[in-house]
Image (cartoon, rainbow, N blue to C red):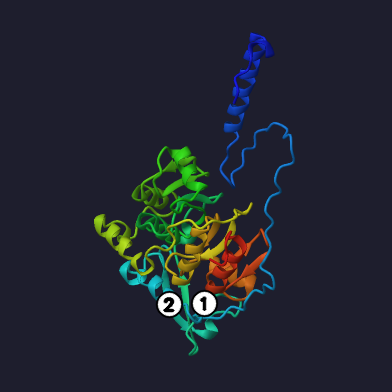
Amino acid sequence: MQPMAPAAAPPAALLLHRRATATARARGASLVAVRAQPDTAAAPTPTSAPDPPPEFKPPQGFKAPEPKRFAVKEGQQGSVLGASLAIPLRLGTGVFVLGYSPSLVSQSDIPSDQYALELGVGWKVKEESKIGQCKRPEKPIEIYEFEGCPFCRKVREMVSVLDLDVLFYPCPQKGPTFRPKVLEMGGKKQFPYMVDPNTGVAMYESDDIIKYLADTYGDGTVPIMLRLGLLTAITAGLATLGRIGKGNSYTASKLPPQPIEIWAYEGSPFCKLVRETLVELELPHLLHSCARGSPKRQEFFKKMGTFQAPYIEDPNTGVKMFESAEIIEYLKATYALYPSS
C-alpha cells in the first residue's frame, strides 16, 4: 500500500482515520461466535445482505424405513460385532439403569399397552428400577465429549445408568465448533466437560462428573465398573478397540440450527454406530437415555406402539426414523459437505 501523502489529509483527519480503522477491526473480531450458540447481543447493521443459512431437507427420494427387530443390515455385521466388544469388557455397564430388577412373568400378566421384553414362548420380562425415586433435572445436562474417548465413555455409561437426558456437543479432533468453545468456557481443551444448567455447576474430570451425577440425580452410588480406578480406565480404553478410530475425527459438515433428538443408550452397539456419525459430523444431539429398566421405554412404546433404539427425530428436516444403518446414511447425506466420501 502506498504511503499517504501529508497533503492528502491533515494530521487530525489521519488520526481519526486510523482510530476508525482500528475500531472496525476490533468490532469484527469481537463478533466471532461459535456455531449453534449465536451471540444475542445487537450487532451493527450490515452493509450487505448476509449469506442465507443453509437449507436442510431429506435426501431426494428419502423414505423412512420400517423398524426391523434384531435385524442387521448386510455389510454391517462387522461394525456391530466391533461395537459389541464393549459389553463384556465393561460387564454390561450402561445397559441397565440404576436398581434394575427383571422378573419373568406370563404374557397375560402384562397388558398389551405396556412395554415388556417378549421371549416369544408365552413369557415376558417385567423390568423395574429405582429411577422413579431419583431427582430429575428440569433442563438437559450439557456434555462436551467425543465417542472414541474412554474417559468420555465412563461418563456416558453413568448417564445411561441414571437415565438422564443430555444435550451432547461433539468435540471430534479438529472439530471447528465445540472444541474451541470448551477452551473458551473452561480454559482447557480437556474432555469430557460438563455443564449443568440446573445448578450452575461446570467441571472437567470424568470421575468428578460421575460422582456429581450420582449424588445429584441418583442415590449416591456409583456402579462397581466405574469406581475401579485404573482398571476402569483400562477396560474403557479396551472397549474402543473394536471401533478404533471411529467417532474421533471431524468430517466437514453443515451445522443445523437445532439439535437432533435421539433415543439411545450406551450399552447398545447399534446406538454406538449412530453416535459415531453424530460425533464425526459434529452434530449436537439431545439424547434421551433409555437403557433396560428405563421408564422412557414405556413412554416411547405408548407413543410409537413399539420400542427400538436407536430412533431419531430431526427437527431441522422433519424426519423421524428407526434403523441404525439407514440413520447413518441419512445423517451423512443430509449434513456432510461431501456425502459421497
Choose mark 1 or mark 2, whichever is in front. 1
Graded by Cα atoms within 10 Å as few (under 14), some (14 to 19) or many (20 or more), the crowding at tag 1 reads: many
Residue 283, position as x, y percentages in the image:
55, 56
Q: Which image quarter holds the N terminus? A: top right
Q: Is residue 308 visible?
A: no
Query: For residue 155, what is the image quadrant?
Result: bottom left
Q: Which mark is residue 103?
A: 2
**Secondary structure state at the residue bearing disc 1:** loop
Q: Is residue 230 left or right of residue 62?
A: left
Question: Does 227 appear above or below 189?
Answer: below
The first of marks 1 and 2 along the sequence is 2
At a point 46% along the width and 41% down the height, the residue shown is 201
Outermost left residue = 230
Disc 1/disc 2 C-alpha distance (Å)? 11 Å
Question: Does 125 appear above or below 187?
Answer: below
- Which residue is identified by label 1? 116
Kindly identify the amino acid type of the residue bearing the numbered disc 2.
Answer: Ser
**Secondary structure state at the residue bearing disc 2:** strand
Query: For residue 259, what is the image quadrant?
Result: bottom right
Q: Relative to the observer, which residue lies in front, 176 or 178? A: 176
Q: Is residue 36 left or right of residue 228?
A: right
Kindly identify the amino acid type of the residue bearing the numbered disc 1.
Answer: Ala
Residue 337, position as x, y percentages in the image:
58, 59
